Image: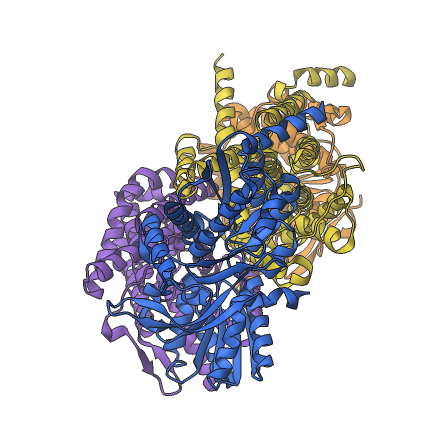
Amino acid sequence: MKRTFLAALAALAMSGAAYADTIKIGVVGPFSGPFALQGKNFKAGIDAYMAVNGSKVGDDDIEIIYRDVPQADPAQSKALAQELVVKEGVQYLAGFYFTPDAMAVTPLLEQANVPLVIMNAATSAIVTKSPLVVRTSFTTWQTSTPIAKVAKDAGVSKVISVVSDYGPGVDAENAFKAGFEAAGGQVVEAIRMPLATNDFSPIMQRIKDSGAEGVFAFLPSGPTTLGFVKAYNENGLKSGGIKFFAPGDLTQESDLPALGEAALGIQTTFHYAVSHDSPENKAFVEAASKAIGNPAELSFPSIGAYDGMHVIYKMIEATGGEQDAQKAVDAVKGLAWTSPRGPVSIDPESRHITQNIYLREVAKADDGTYYNKEVQTFEKQGDPGLAAVK
Amino acid sequence: MSMTTTNDLIAERPAKHRFGGGDLIGLGVILALAVIGYFLFPNNLALLTRIIAIALLVLSLDLVTGYCGVATLGHAALFGAGAYAAGIVSAHYGINDPIAMLAFGIVAGAIAGLICGAVILRAHGLPQLVLSIALIHLFHEFANKASSWTGGSDGLSGIAPSALIGLYEFDLWGRTAYVFGVVLLVLVFFILRLIVRSPFGMLCRAIKEDPIRIRSMGASPKAALMKMYIISGAVAGVGGALNAISTQVVGLDSLSFTMSAESLVMLVLGGTGSLFGALTGTIVFMFFEDVVSAANPFHWLTMVGALLIAVVLFAPKGLFGTAAAFVARRREAK
Amino acid sequence: MQTVLSIAIDALAYGMVLFVISIGLSVTMGLMRVVNLAHGAFAMIGGYIASYAARDLGLAYGFAIVLAVFGTILIAIPIERLLYRRIYGAPELTQVLMTIGITFCIIGIANYVFGPTLKTVPLPPQLQGSVDLGFRAIATHRLFAILCGLAVALALWYAIEKTAFGVKLRASVDNAAMAAALGVRTEIVYAVSFAVAVGLAAFGGVVGAELLPVEPYYALRYMVTFLVVVSVGGAGSIPGALLACLLLGGIDTTGRYLMPEFGEFFFYLAVIAIICVFPRGLAGRAKG
Amino acid sequence: MQPIFEVRNLKRAFGGLAVTNDVSLSMAPGDRVALIGPNGAGKTTFVNLVTGNLVPDSGDVRLGGETVTGIDAIGRVRRGLVRSFQVTRLFLDMTPAEHVALAVLQRDGRSGRLFGNFLAMPDVMDEVGQLLGKLGLRDLMHRKVSEIAYGQQRLLEIAVALALKPKVLLLDEPAAGVPQSDTGRIEQALADLPADLAVLMIEHDMDLVFRFAKRVVVLAAGAIIFDGSPSDVTQDPRVREAYLGSYANASHAA
């Protein structure tokens, strides 16, 4: 009895693949709550891809099913992923803004025969949890390592590191430290501050007292970056010549209107700037702006989602719409294409995206808006984090 | 003389006190719901399991808030302690037997209950609420700091529960986890029904109404509340362990203010001071949230807000509390 | 010595911003006995209105503040009449449920109307930049926030202790039935107090926007902080709230300077310690 | 006979004002003592000092030969010093049966039991039934307290106190606020109190005092100014001066 029941369920799930001509993709992300903006960007990236490339692969229609996990909540994430796989019969899982949410899903993949395409979650180790995980976003290690070289090249040899005290912050601190020390610099002090810090003045005082020539900072994009950058200006660090280095989370495009003048000149390294100058990106920004409604809300998760969709489309092409997770993942190993962010490829070993990391500087455009201006390119960067974790 | 008196008294007992009657109905309802859930949502067992885990947390909260009148916005500390304990023994010490993990969860929950009780019971009313908020933040921050043990904000992964009693693997469909959860919920519910009717349960209800009067009867309210806090911790620990076993990842959210506040909302929604109220509140809230957030993942929060407002306006004693009062009135009117 | 002074200045500035935003909550919770978890939502509405007025309409900062305060009160009036009136005197947990529900609704609506991005209130040139205090620089708008805090504290203290309305308010709080019997129209007193509390929230939301930027989740993000500050001070006490804000601001700032990695521990352990010593808050009244 | 309850030189001052000033009192099992005194005489403070809710500045409280001055209120109850409240403090959502059962279980050290319902404990129910029967509350035993009359609530207060099997019982105005029609039942209940119980009744109603007490203690300005038989109390010039003259008339008028 039990066995037949299971078989029936399995058949039900499979049937979606074999006979119907609609292929479902389940996308889990923060669509409401404090990170709603990032979820909105997921949707914008996906919509943009489908607007440009059509909502069909071969004969199969593509349908996206969204599920909301407002804040990191692995139990909810797993429950929703399970529901998507078992009830909705999705062939692909995608999205995932937070690392624990993605981690919770990895044990399901093999049994469910479903690949997981991560469109944001940035902790290196996720790809090691299952061979069916592919990531099209970035890791904190990947975006934070090049800035160390930038700092050293700018003639700064003593840096204080200031990060939010949680997983990605610690990753950023380690990545920067490794890179900076390898380049011959010295991290004089490493401060970890609580995520829920509203007033950064005391931190700025610490930075001043440390005697460092530059500060490396990591905070999650959103409201706190505003306070941090403003405090950096108002407490006289900027005018005092202490240079500011950070990965691009700090100056995501959707925060720039609020940061405004205070952010001018801040140098960050990141995998994507909305201002990236290429025909692919022009097309993407146009489509994504239309999808999101307000172009000022466009930010980096959209590109992870856009390229994630590209990978999934390739997977569907390779499998001809059949549900075969391993075949699908194998098909995109080594896949290279020109993304709106520049040339990228999926590393066959780690299944993580190899991409250019750009050094950008916040600049003011002629129309008075602020943007990340790309000034230098670090080509074909892999994820140094995996090696460091091992 | 004395014998007849006793018999008379037992015969006179009001219906609601008749031993076992209410319990059997309650257990029957839970089991019926569990079976209906299984067949109605065979594809959604993970959600149902999650509801069960949260229901255990809300039941645990009801013990201290509903039965003892303690105001707390930090109850997830007990739940999270259970979840992390069960997760850590599996991920770091290779203790993968679900029953053993559960036992660790219960003990950790009870210890967390002891700690929280010792702090929270030092004040009343609003300051008490703030003590609980401070505690949950301390727990959360501690788990974040101890990332070599807890995985910090990346979550504790690598939890691999072995087959339940050596026979039933935890599978993709979540059937084992679901059945395990239902069994735990039924057991806990049954035990709690006994406890709330026991002399100790009666003592706690009395403390909720007037702790000073209880002192003049020679009982220590503080000692009783501490005891209830430990029991509550054990119950929350069951929920946390179930969560860790079924999800196989424990995140900081299980120790968060958000989860504490949500569990309080669910409890008040269903009706405090009644185990059925706690269950009703959890089921209604989580199903409602699941349905509206699937229907519109972007703007469902407004709908949940409207639900809460509507409940306060039209069912001020909570869904179950108001329904029970309505039935009681009807019965009296007859 | 310089460091100590510098921390003290930061603590004062941070504490005063907290005070301006939280004091309205102290009024609703202490004087009206409503656990108003929607306080942050009203502060947020104020912030949105000011941001819209100053950024999109290009109005002057001062005018934007006035617009924010009265606009928020205008929005709050129907909410008070339809919803809050039902929960005056209700059990605390019922109040929590209702006001969380209101907060969820407001967050959802704000997200829909204004989108999820950060909104700022552009400062007038006079408040931009920094002032040199000799040993360090401090942002001008922070000095402005300190002054606003002092002004609000004085005005409220005067209104409650020295005016006829204050007498009626205190009478209504102590014994509503008796006050009504003496001819005080308590529902008007309550409505006015509510409007004042909401107006203060909006004012705080605007003045504090540099530190706590406006976005839809604002309503819940800082709620805990407000609640903690008000309770530590003793709900309903203006001097208590002021003292609590300065004390907690000081602890928070010092903790974050000395050992930022344990900043949260520092703050919340201090909260627990204070409440254990003063179970009714710093200026708690015996009744409550 | 060995005194069961003794107060020796009890003193307590609030801000320099001696509210209880060198009070000594001794009671033997079976004593029926009424404590009277004008408003502000310090009766409440005295009760709080005796029950352990206030700590004396000096002096001793002894119970059955044991000094309990350093023992808290709960410990004193457990040693047999029980009080009732002037304004009923009952649990409005609970039934009289539950009240008495709780007291019985607490007395036996069984109130912490997690399993079993008192309704299914014959020994407890026996005692509950007898006690409530004696006080005429049998028929109401499963009603909520909030639904029964005030006079019956006062009787329940006495039942709860008795269920604790006290050695010394402090009754704080047991008939206060009860309509005239119901006072008879309360007086009957007082007359039926166990013979070996030492009872200290704080009371304003002089009729009740004269009917109930074998001995009257008068407290004025924190000190005992009279301790003797009821027949003598009205004759005592100090009492007359301090208290009785005006008060007795008022009392009779009411």
According to the rendering, which colour does chain C have?
Answer: purple
The residue shown at (31%, 62%) is C120
Tell me, yes or no, if residue D89 can be seen here. Answer: no
Q: If the image is split into quadrants, where does the N terminus of chain D sit?
A: top right
Give the blue chain's letter: A
Of C152 and C256, which appears nearest the observer?
Answer: C256
Q: Is residue D237 above or below residue D248?
A: below
Chain B shade = yellow
A263 relative to C189, above or below: below
Residue in the image at 65% along x and 67% along y: A387
Chain in orange, by letter, is D
Q: Residue D197, percent across and down?
A: 73, 36
Can residue B35 be seen from the camera position used here? Answer: yes
Q: Dividing the image into 4 quarters, which one contains the C terminus of chain D?
A: top left
Q: Position of residue C205 (x, y in %)?
A: 33, 59
Q: Is residue D228 left or right of residue C47?
A: right
Query: Where is residue A45 drawn, in percent x and y?
Result: 41, 51
